[in-house]
Each structure stands twice: as C-alpha cells, then as structure tokens.
Amino acid sequence: MKVTELKSEGLSKSYKIVIPSATINKAIDARLLEVASTAKIDGFRPGKVPMTIVKSRFGTQVSGEVVEKQVSDSMRKLLTDKKIKPAMQPKVDFEGKPLDGTDVKFTINLEIMPDIKIEDFSKLKFDRLIAEVEDKDINKALEDIANNQKSYAPLKKKRKSKVGDSVLIDFKGYMDGKLFDGGTAENHRLELGSGQMIPGFEDQLVGLNINDKKSVEVKFPENYQKADLSGKPATFEVTVKDILEAEKSKINDELATRMGLPDLKSLKEAIKNQIEINYKATARNRIKRDLLDNLSKQYKFDVPKTMLENENKVIWDRFEQDRKAGVIDDIDKGKKDSVLKKEYSEIAERRVRLGLLMAEIGDVNKITVTEDEIKTAVMQEARKYPGEENKVIEFYQKNPEAANAVRAPLFEEKVVDHIISKCSIKDIKVSSEKLYEDNVVEDATAKSKNKKPSKTGAKKNIKVKPKK
C-alpha cells in the first residue's frame, strides 16, 4: 500500500492510502479458493465446484469482505507504523467505487490524542483540614433525628391550625367549574408547611378550625407533571376533618431503639462515626478540588476538537433540559445565551483536558477498575431502589454504556487517590465551621457551587434506620 500525508495541523491528521488492485485481486483469488474448498452447491461434490461458478455465486460477497479487511488492515498498519493514538473513530472517505476492480483509494481523517508529559506529583503541596467531632455536632444530629421521628397527637386545647400541624382533609378540585381527574381525595393526611401540595394550597389551610370549609384558589406550576394542568388556575373545596399537633420525639433510649440501636449511647456513637466519615470525605474532596484546579492550570495541552464539541453539546443539552423544567442555577439567571455558552464551553474544555490527563495518568500507572468494584458500585446503586434491586442490576448488565458510566467515576477516584498519595499533604486541625467554610462539590469541574453540604449529615447520612 502507498500512504501519503495530506494534512498535519495540531491534532488533526489526514492521510491518503492506495491499495493496488493487484493486492486486492490476489487476496480475492486466495479467498475464493478457500470458499471453493468448502462450498456446497447442488450437483457438485465439496471442493469440486468450478471456479467460474464459485466466482458467479460468491464473487461479490468475497470482494466486499476482502476490500473491507484490506482497508481495516491498512488503517491498523498506518496507526501502528506512525504510533498514532486516535482520539475518536477515524473518518474514511473512498475515491470512486472500491469494488470496481481498480486500485482502492481512500482518505483517512482523524484527530490524535495529545502528547501528555506527566510531571512529578511530589512537588504538589496541599493542606488537609482535620476537624474533630464536637458534642454540639452530635447534639444537633440528635435534634434532627428527633424532629424527623416526630409523631402527631390530638390537640390538647382547641385552637386553629398552624404550620407543622397534620390536618385530615377531604377536597374536590375544580377547573372551569368542573371536577378534574386526580383532584379529589378523602381522609387525606397533610402536614402544613411540608410542601406536599402545589404552592399556595397549604398556606390557605393555616388558621382554620376542625370542621371548617375553605375554598382554596391556586394555580398549577408551569412545568407541572401533568401537562394538561400546567399553568392553569383551579379551586379546591376543602373540609378540615381533624387537626393533630406534632410531638417531637424525646432523645432517649426509646429513640435509639426506634433507630435500630440498643441504647442512646450506641446511637451517639453511630452518629459520631458517620460525622467523622463525612468530615474525612469533605477534607478529601477539598484536596481533590484543589488538585484538579492545580492540574487544570499546570497542563495546557491541546484537546481534540471533536471531543470538545461532543462535551459542549452534552453540557448545553443538559442545560436546555433543565431550563425547560424551570431549574436554573442562581449564577446563570439573567445571563444571555452567548455568555452562558462561552462559560459552559470553558467548563467543557476543562473537563475534556482533565479527563484526558486522568486517563493518561491511569494508563502510565496501570490503574484499572475491577469487575468486582463495578459490581459493588452497582449494588450500592440498586439499594437506593428497595424492591427494584434486581431490575437495576439487570439494567446495568444489559447496558454496557450504563456500566461504563459506573466505571468512569471509580477510575477517576482511583487516579485521584494515586496522585494524592504522591503529593505532600500537611494536616491542619480546624473547626467544623472552617472545614465547611466554602462550598465543596464532588465534581470539581461543575459550574454551580451554590449548594453547601450538611456538616453532620444527620438526616441523610446517618446509617441507622427505624424499625418497622
């Protein structure tokens, strides 16, 4: 074959390859001989079919197979000889028809992976903030658990409903004077202020007595789950049948027992252990954030254009979906699309560059993700859907892309841990307030940083569950 370089601009390469017709024809003849030796055609014994008949019957198919293999082999040889690592699948354009008996000529257009030189990580220095769990943190977590485990009791003294009460109601929903589907219920238990109902509904039930009736005027949100109700006004005729007041659970051994632990001391220990885990995770995420910021500034290699375009599209499509759903980060509100696209383009470039860097570091250091690690991660994901675990596991087994989505973050974390192990880390004791002084997000390439994590994680992360 003959190879001619047509273009070499940065990471963009183009080559023309010519495979002589003699090479193609020789390969076709050899393949036809193989076919003839095993071909089964009525009237002929195996291996005794005349070549003219073999060519007539199998010629076109064999020619296609041979040309495809010759093209594939020539591309592989080109990449091997020139030590090229394609960033994406190369694009192949043929000149003329590859099966017309003449030389097979085609052009390969591709982007190559950038040459990344890994620096010495031991020169990097980071502070690891160490916070001790204080009694106030444990007490705050206990208060949160007690509030979450609250019960309701009849009113001790007759009064009007207020936020935090649980009311028993009947209601009928009307739109344009007619009842609408799904707008009617009886003996519905509702905690006022919980946000269970659409905006404005619960507010209008505050200040009512038992047996009071109320016409509640509301408007469904623009992006309501039922499209036929979105943005439309409605009236609910509501009857308050009962009012119960909340009673916060007492912090004692009984509360611990309800949480599945033998006594209050054990509950406190469980809370302390979980807070320590949260603190360590936050400290580690701070180092990861600072590390990725450092690497992003230190490594300035070019990134493949196609990869950047694909990542840009993924990010912008997700933003468009969120915007249609009415979910927009505060930092994005009021900005023109041109400004947002520029900002998200910078994020896309950072993500692609860091992704390539992580992949190179992992490759050089032979870092891999085992099947057992993937299975463990899938099981953890499946546990989030009680009763549906087998369906979740089956989904990942049947969808390689979903499995890759699990593998990618596991690989990244292992690479980050490897880098951190090589860096110079200085432990600094701080208060929990200092540990959470600024926002720490797991995705250090994310744009939004307006969500501050809970210090104790009491309501969400304490791994104790009430007994049924």
Image (spheres, helix red, strand yellow):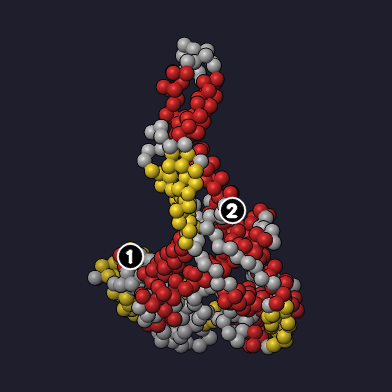
At x 45% / y 48%, what residue is drawn?
A: 16
User: Which is more toward the observer, 126 or 300?
Assistant: 300
2 or 1: tag closer to the N-terminus: 2
Q: Secondary structure at mark 1?
A: helix
User: Which is more toward the observer, 366 or 215?
Assistant: 366
Q: Tell me residue 98's x, y (percent).
A: 41, 37
Q: Tell me residue 391's x, y (percent).
A: 55, 52
Q: Quadrant of residue 152?
A: bottom right
Res 276 visible: no
The answer to whether residue 89 is above or below residue 312 is: above
Q: Tell me residue 342's x, y (percent).
A: 41, 75
- Residue 246 marker: none
- CA distance separating discs 2 and 1: 55 Å
At x 70% / y 77%, what residue is drawn?
A: 123
Q: Tell me residue 251's x, y (percent).
A: 67, 82
Q: Name the residue that disc number 2 marks.
A: 83
Most extreme residue toward the top is 43
At x 40% / y 82%, what residue is drawn?
A: 203
Residue 468 located left or right of residue 319: right
The amino acid beneath tag 1 is Ala
Q: Quadrant of residue 287?
A: bottom right
Q: Name the residue that disc number 1 marks.
A: 227
User: Which is more toward the observer, 394 or 6?
Assistant: 6
Res 361 visible: yes
The amino acid beneath tag 2 is Lys
User: Which is more toward the observer, 173 or 267?
Assistant: 267
Q: Secondary structure at mark 2?
A: loop
The quadrant of the picture occupied by the C terminus is bottom right
Q: Quadrant of residue 437?
A: bottom right
Instruction: Select label 2 or label 1 by which is in front.
Output: 2
The answer to whether residue 432 is above or below residue 319 is: below
